[in-house]
Image: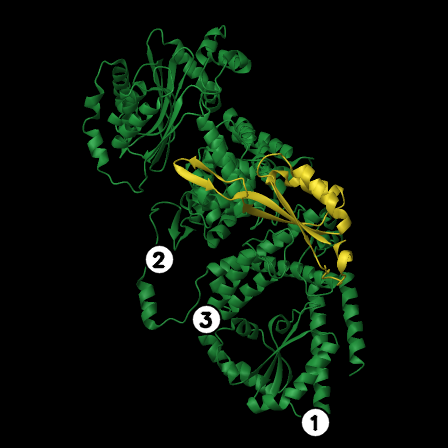
Chain colours: A yellow, B green
């Protein structure tokens, strides 16, 4: 099992979510986050006041997937989240030892379905 | 005792079957209570005889809901073990343990406490809940004499002394509970016990009466009100029984699923009360909310009453001498008393003008109506000897309420009393309407009123999310139209239409016709309703840092004024979905889009110029309005103005400008002065010339006028159209109509160069400069050479003061800068001015910019 974390542009979220649903991935955790990588923030001035946006708004998706679905999920996110501009985000993959469904204590990949 | 368990199960089942067959909640609760009493007494007696002990020194008391004989199917049994002394407590411990286990095995959930008689004399300040539950004590089993001592000798004294404490604690606990549920009964899935309007409201009100000694006159309830309360309690009790049976546990949440089941069996509705008409879950929930409102209204009225307290003689004498605080209102039918609007003359309310003035006062001052006032209004409205006078509310009166600083303070009680639907019958479609949605938490009408309350909160934002939006709320123009849009934006959700926005727009058609909105007013509300989801959608689905997104959005919105309204509407609409919906993240994204779009408007003004031939519908409209035979001269007039000109002026205004334009041949300076509700608007049309803007600003300063907004546009033929909105600080024009002509002449003379400006200005500046500003604004001067192809943008943010615009204009003129376009605005004591400048038809050189910066910095400080 692999935990997939993707940081994406907020504007791409709906498309990414729909595309993941289409390949059978419906369970995910979504968080509104702020951050920056190479895409630094910028400053807007409105009515004499500076509004500095040094941490840009992003969406973080988290999901734990069975190994066989990981490549498909990564491809899907790459296809739908990419605009080609700086700031499109990143995907992180980490191995997960176990998963447990709290309701019935199922373990492993069974707990993911 | 082994046989008791199955017997109890069978009896429980029989009670449930009877309830399902239609037995009332009252009888069901009574049956459950009798069953519990009987079994407790039997188990206690059998255990006691088994242990060979006497009950002396111990008795069992039922407390709380069980004490009141309101035992719901899966509620806990609140039992107090009362000991005569500490020894009894030790001696009875094994018996009590066995007793509790036996009851548990029989399916009773016992929640027990133990106290000695001595302990009961003390008030536990950190456990007010226990003392409140003790108010409902009832003897169950054991030493009856011990109970008698507690009930008649031990408790009355401490309870009497503790009344102020108990009342204060009860109010505190109630306030906390109501706040936890957002202070509204209108939850989509309410908790029928705990949420506002639930059974707990009834109980809290009952405790308040009990603590104050059951003095009926204190609470002043009518027989009709008592009957309504009784009906509401029966209705909610039926629901709570139903929920317990369906959930098979003490879960009081009225979920969507159970709403449908309850509606299907017309739960709680009398047989002869049109049960068939109330089969849809939405209709049935409306009945629920009506009953919940009865309980909640009673509780809130009780909460507003002064807490009864033991007063010393000195206090009583002091209070008798003290006159209640009544603020000025003199002859008015109402006055502010102890921070609430109270009615002085009930009969005066029969005149609807007076009634609406009361709401207008609430909206203007933010002072709410007292519950007693709210109670009086329907009484007056329904009184056969007080026929309504001046019944229909004109748009202007409603507008006054909507445009105020606290519209929600008036609209909320107006809705409760049915007055809002008198004025806006369209609103009835969403009255108490539950729309299944896992995102929204409240009914549609509640959501709507919350949007308005979230906006009025922006006067003093309660948290960081609102800080940026505060200045928007304070400066937004046509607040009345914004609030009207909010009132109607979701009305379509209660209409049989596919798309609720289309329904809301239909509702606007009828509302606009009835309220007699002008075409422009209706168009603005139409836009806001039609596009009420667009800004939120742009924030969530578009890259708001992409200039294309911003320019596309600006093209949709068209004007900064409208952007401001749409932004506030979006902020409020998201905020009112549920308390967590407007995350700081979303609030910031929305603000970024607002700022980017706003800046786009001010930085792209001269990029988008009018080509009159592309504006055929406008040309035709102006031709009709001015009775012109052809559109040629209209084309000449419009050609080259920034597109914003069309966006900020109505067709009628453009037509009047054109009329002035046509007179330029006979008189080269054309002016038009119009008095608006709170200000004056001056339009001046003439051929462009150096220092023109500075001269007009100077005349206004010389006359003591305070410019709050201005713009200057030029067309391709070099005709400039300057518009100044100003307030008359000394009421010169308002109090002396003859001065209007002198003012106009003075303006004409200065602009034509016939009279010097300096004489007019002398003395005025000195007087005005002496006043210290309430808020310090740091001057900021910035140049932008990239936004416009032809001009250099100069943005000045500085402390506003009379004559400021003249000072800036004079500095610009001195350095030979030509104002191509100007946008002048104020925000409290802050002036925000944007000028598109050229010098000899080119952008300003770096050196000129620097010189100008120094000159302005020296002038503005």
The answer to whether residue B359 is seen in the rendering is no
Give the left or right position of residue B657, taking residue B95 as reference: left
Residue B159 in the image: above or below residue B721: below
Provide the chain ID for the residue under circle 2: B
Residue at 43 percent across and 36 percent down: it is A45
**Residue neighbourhood size for the residue with mark 3, other residues' Cα within 10 Å, grouped as few (<14), some (14–19), many (≥20):** some
Q: Nearer the viewer, residue B502 or B755?
A: B755
Judge from the rendering whether residue B757 lies leftward or rightward of residue B223; answer left or right: left
Q: Nearer the viewer, residue B832 or B399?
A: B832
What is the chain identity of the residue bearing mark 3? B
Is residue B376 shown left or right of residue B724? right
Label 1 element class: loop
Quadrant of the image occupied by residue B141? bottom right
Q: Of label 2 and label 3, which has the lower sequence position?
A: 3
- The nearer-to-camera label among 2 and 1 is 1
For the N terminus of chain B, give its image quadrant.
bottom right
Identify residue for label 1: B52
Is label 1 on the same chain as label 3? yes
User: Is disc 2 in the same subunit as disc 1?
Assistant: yes
Q: Which mark is residue B165?
A: 3
Q: Earlier in the sequence, mark 2 or mark 1?
A: 1
Query: What kind of element bears circle 3?
Result: helix
Tell me, yes or no, whether dots 2 and 3 are on the same chain: yes
Residue where numbered disc 2 is placed: B324
User: Is residue B741 something that shows in the picture?
Assistant: yes
Q: Quadrant of residue B538?
A: top right
Q: Position of residue B128 (x, y in %)?
A: 51, 72
Q: CA distance from mark 2 to mark 1?
A: 65 Å
Under tag 2, what secondary structure?
Answer: loop
Task: Tell me the CA gap for discs 1 and 3.
Answer: 43 Å
Give the mark count.
3
Q: Nearer the viewer, residue B609 or B268?
A: B609
């Amino acid at each position: 099992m692999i935990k997939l974390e993707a940081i994406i542009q907020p504007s791409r979220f709906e498309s990414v979510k729909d595309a993941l649903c289409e390949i059978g991935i419906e369970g995910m955790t979504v968080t509104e986050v702020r951050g920056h990588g190479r895409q630094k923030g910028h400053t807007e001035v409105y009515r004499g006041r500076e509004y500095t946006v040094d941490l840009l708004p992003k969406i973080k998706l988290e999901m734990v997937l069975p190994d066989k679905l990981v490549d498909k999920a990564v491809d899907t996110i790459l296809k739908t989240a990419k605009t080609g501009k700086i700031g499109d985000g990143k995907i992180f993959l980490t191995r997960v030892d176990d998963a447990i469904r709290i309701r019935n204590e199922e373990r492993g990949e069974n707990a993911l379905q | 005792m082994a046989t008791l368990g199955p017997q109890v199960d069978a009896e429980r089942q029989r009670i449930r079957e009877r309830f399902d067959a239609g037995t009332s909640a009252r009888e069901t609760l009574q049956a459950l209570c009798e069953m519990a009493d009987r079994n407790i007494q039997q188990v206690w007696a059998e255990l006691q005889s088994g242990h060979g002990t006497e009950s002396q020194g111990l008795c069992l008391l039922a407390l709380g809901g069980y004490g009141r004989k309101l035992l719901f199917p899966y509620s806990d049994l609140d039992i107090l073990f009362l000991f005569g002394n500490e020894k009894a407590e030790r001696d009875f411990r094994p018996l009590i343990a066995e007793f509790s286990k036996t009851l548990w095995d029989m399916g009773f959930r016992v929640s027990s406490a133990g106290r000695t008689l001595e302990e009961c004399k003390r008030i536990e300040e950190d456990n007010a809940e226990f003392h409140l539950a003790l108010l409902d004590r009832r003897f169950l089993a054991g030493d009856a004499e011990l109970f008698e001592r507690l009930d008649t000798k031990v408790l009355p004294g401490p309870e009497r002394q503790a009344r102020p404490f108990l009342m204060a604690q009860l109010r505190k606990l109630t306030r906390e509970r109501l706040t936890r549920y957002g202070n509204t009964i209108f939850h989509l899935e309410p908790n029928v016990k705990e949420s506002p309007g639930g059974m707990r409201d009834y109980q809290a009100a009952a405790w308040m009466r009990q603590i104050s000694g059951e003095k009926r006159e204190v609470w002043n309830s009518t027989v009709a009100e008592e009957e309504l309360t009784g009906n509401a309690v029966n209705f909610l009790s039926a629901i709570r029984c139903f929920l317990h049976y369906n959930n098979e546990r003490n879960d009081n949440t009225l979920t969507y699923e159970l709403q449908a089941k309850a509606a299907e069996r017309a739960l709680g509705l009398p047989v002869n009360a049109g049960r068939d008409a109330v089969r849809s879950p939405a209709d049935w929930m409306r009945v629920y909310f009506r009953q919940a409102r009865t309980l909640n209204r009673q509780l809130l009225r009780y909460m507003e009453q002064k807490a009864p307290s033991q007063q010393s003689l000195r206090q009583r004498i002091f209070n008798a001498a003290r006159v209640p605080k009544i603020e000025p209102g003199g002859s008015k039918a109402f006055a502010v008393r102890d921070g609430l609007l109270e009615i002085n003359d009930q009969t005066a309310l029969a005149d609807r003008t007076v009634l609406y003035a009361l709401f207008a006062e609430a909206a203007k001052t933010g002072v709410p109506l007292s519950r007693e006032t709210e109670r009086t209004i329907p009484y007056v409205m329904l009184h056969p000897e007080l026929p309504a006078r001046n019944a229909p509310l004109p748009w202007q009166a409603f507008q006054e309420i909507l445009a105020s600083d606290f519209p929600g303070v008036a609209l909320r009680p107006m809705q409760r009393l049915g007055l809002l639907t008198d004025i806006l019958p369209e609103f009835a479609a969403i009255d108490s309407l539950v729309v299944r949605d896992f995102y929204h938490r409240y009914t549609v009408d509640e959501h709507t009123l919350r949007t308005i309350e979230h906006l009025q909160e922006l006067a003093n934002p309660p948290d960081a999310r609102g800080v940026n939006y505060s200045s928007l709320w304070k400066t937004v123009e046509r607040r009345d139209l914004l609030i009207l849009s909010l009132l109607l934006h979701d009305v379509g959700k209660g209409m049989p239409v596919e798309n609720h926005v289309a329904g809301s727009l239909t509702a606007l058609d009828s509302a606009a016709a009835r309220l007699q909105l002008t075409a422009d007013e209706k168009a603005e509300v139409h836009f806001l309703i039609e596009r009420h989801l667009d800004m939120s959608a742009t924030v969530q689905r578009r890259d708001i840092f992409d200039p294309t997104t911003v320019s596309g959005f600006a093209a949709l919105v068209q004007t900064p004024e409208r952007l401001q309204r749409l932004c506030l509407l979006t902020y409020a609409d998201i905020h009112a979905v549920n308390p967590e919906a407007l995350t700081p993240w979303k609030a910031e994204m929305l603000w970024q889009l607002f700022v980017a779009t706003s800046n786009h408007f001010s930085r792209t003004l001269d990029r988008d110029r009018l080509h009159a031939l592309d504006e055929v519908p406008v040309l035709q409209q102006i031709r009709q309005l001015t009775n012109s035979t052809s559109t040629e001269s209209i084309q000449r007039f419009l050609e080259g103005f920034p597109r914003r000109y069309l966006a900020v002026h109505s067709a009628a205004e453009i037509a009047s400008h054109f009329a002035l334009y046509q007179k330029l041949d006979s008189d080269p300076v054309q002016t038009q002065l119009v008095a608006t509700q709170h200000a004056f608007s001056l339009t001046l049309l003439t051929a462009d010339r150096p220092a023109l803007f500075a001269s007009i600003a100077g005349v206004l300063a010389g006359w003591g006028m305070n410019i709050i907004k201005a713009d200057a546009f030029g067309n391709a033929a070099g005709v400039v159209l300057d518009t100044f909105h100003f307030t008359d600080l000394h009421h010169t024009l308002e109090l002396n109509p003859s001065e209007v002509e002198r003012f106009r002449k003075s303006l004409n003379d200065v602009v034509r160069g016939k009279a010097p400006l300096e004489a007019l200005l002398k003395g005025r500046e000195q007087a005005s400069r002496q006043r210290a500003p309430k808020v310090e604004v740091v001057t900021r001067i910035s140049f932008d050479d990239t936004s416009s192809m032809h001009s250099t943008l100069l943005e000045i943010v500085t402390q506003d003061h009379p004559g400021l615009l003249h000072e800036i204009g004079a500095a610009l003129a001195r350095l030979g800068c030509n104002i191509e376009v100007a946008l002048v605005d104020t925000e409290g004591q802050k002036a925000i001015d944007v000028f598109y400048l050229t010098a000899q038809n080119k952008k300003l050189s770096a050196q000129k910019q620097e010189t100008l910066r120094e000159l302005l910095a020296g002038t503005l400080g």
